[in-house]
Image (spheres, helix red, strand yellow):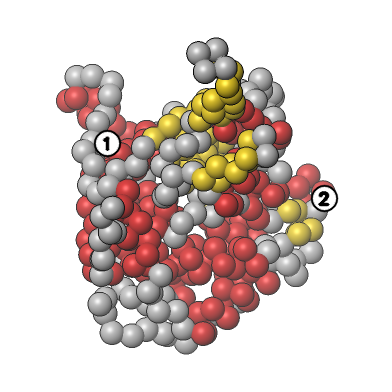
Amino acid sequence: MPTDPQLSLSDVAAIGREVLDRVGTVVVGMRDGLELALGTVLAGGHVLFEDAPGLGKTLAARSLATALGLDFRRLQCTPDLLPSDITGSFVYAPATREFEFRPGPVFTGLFLADEINRTSPKTQSALLEAMAEGQVTIEGRSMPLPRPFHVVATSNPIEYEGTYALPEAQLDRFLVRLSVGYPDRGGEAQVLRNRVQRRHEAAPIAPVIDARTLLAMQAAVEAVFVDDDVIAYCVDLAAATRDIAQVQVGASPRGSQGLLLLARALAVLDGRDFVTPEDVKRCAVPVLAHRLTLTAQAWASGVDPAAIVRHAVAEVPGPPVVGRAGVR
């Protein structure tokens, strides 16, 4: 079996830029969101896109999977979806008179759960083990998923009829929650222009790397230097969300770890082998906001968790400037 390639951090940065440029040829006006999503993949995490329909979330997930050379499976979530529709099940085969396992769509490199809030909590929970441990358990048998394995889920935040809010434990498994918003006028015009020029609906792109190279990129990110002051800053930011009157439950240690993991990946994509406080600040809202449980009064008053996180970033003093020599 061939060994995984060895990559330097400068290699990872160059590949990351190429991936973003390639995806940017078909996904317009989402560069920042795509960079956060790519950073999440490099950090080994999962992405939740929460935005209005028609903004290109599915196209972004499919294009990112293609550029990274990952197998891609999409599942449209509906209220009658069963856990076995995600994980697969054992089916009786008359020819062999035995039960044979037929894997579900989760056995892939990048799994897109479209409109995940339209399926029941029981079915949503079928993804918990897959996201946390990279395996699923079916009829008492644990089955490993391919490596790398990542989940991208989409959720519609403006329509609540026939939907099921994701429980806190499920939300906590997503490293980031992203909202890209509407493109500006020029970006929306470019979307239309691209469609006219293609002369067909499909927007194919060519892979930049394969799954083995992605694993090597993820391994290289582990070499990024993190100063103790930056670690303390991540802890302080997460802790600050626990001491706000409007918050019933603040970010857990998984939140502070998420800040660190994503900040490392973003530092590499920015061409550095060390994490700065600005990397952590950039991660704060995508990583922490969805981990906050508001009090009933704050929720009824329409308090935005993202605003609470931004307030914490403004109030918590950052560490002194840290750094070291450029990318190895």
Closer to the camera in the image, 195 or 42: 42
Q: What element carries label 2?
A: helix
- Residue 103 can be seen, yes or no: yes
Q: Residue at x 50, y 36 (%)?
A: 106
Q: Where is residue 326 in the image (x, y as percent from the top left)?
A: 26, 79
Q: Can residue 281 be seen in this view?
A: no
Closer to viewer: mark 2 or mark 1 = 1
Amino acid identity at mark 2: Gln
Q: How crowded is mark 2: few (under 14 residues within 10 Å), some or many (20 or more)?
A: few
Q: Residue at x 59, y 27 (%)?
A: 89
Residue at the image point whose x is 26% and y is 76% from the top? 327
Residue 260 horizontal/vertical position (percent): 50, 69
Q: Position of residue 294 (x, y in %)?
A: 75, 53
| Rendered residue at 42%/85% (across/down) | 321
Tell me the number on the disc at residue 297: 2
Q: In this view, does 181 lie to the left or right of 291?
A: left
Q: Kindly state the secondary structure of the residue where label 1 is placed.
A: loop
Q: Is residue 181 above or below residue 175?
A: above
Which badge, 2 or 1, comes first in the chain's sequence? 1
Q: Give the residue at mark 1.
A: 26
Task: Judge the density around disc 1: few (<14), some (14-19), many (≥20) Cα neighbours within 10 Å.
Answer: many
Q: In which quarter of the image is residue 29?
A: top left
Q: Considering only vertical position in the picture, is 174 above or below 136?
A: below
Task: Name the residue at the top extreme.
Answer: 94
Disc 1 marks which amino acid? Answer: Val
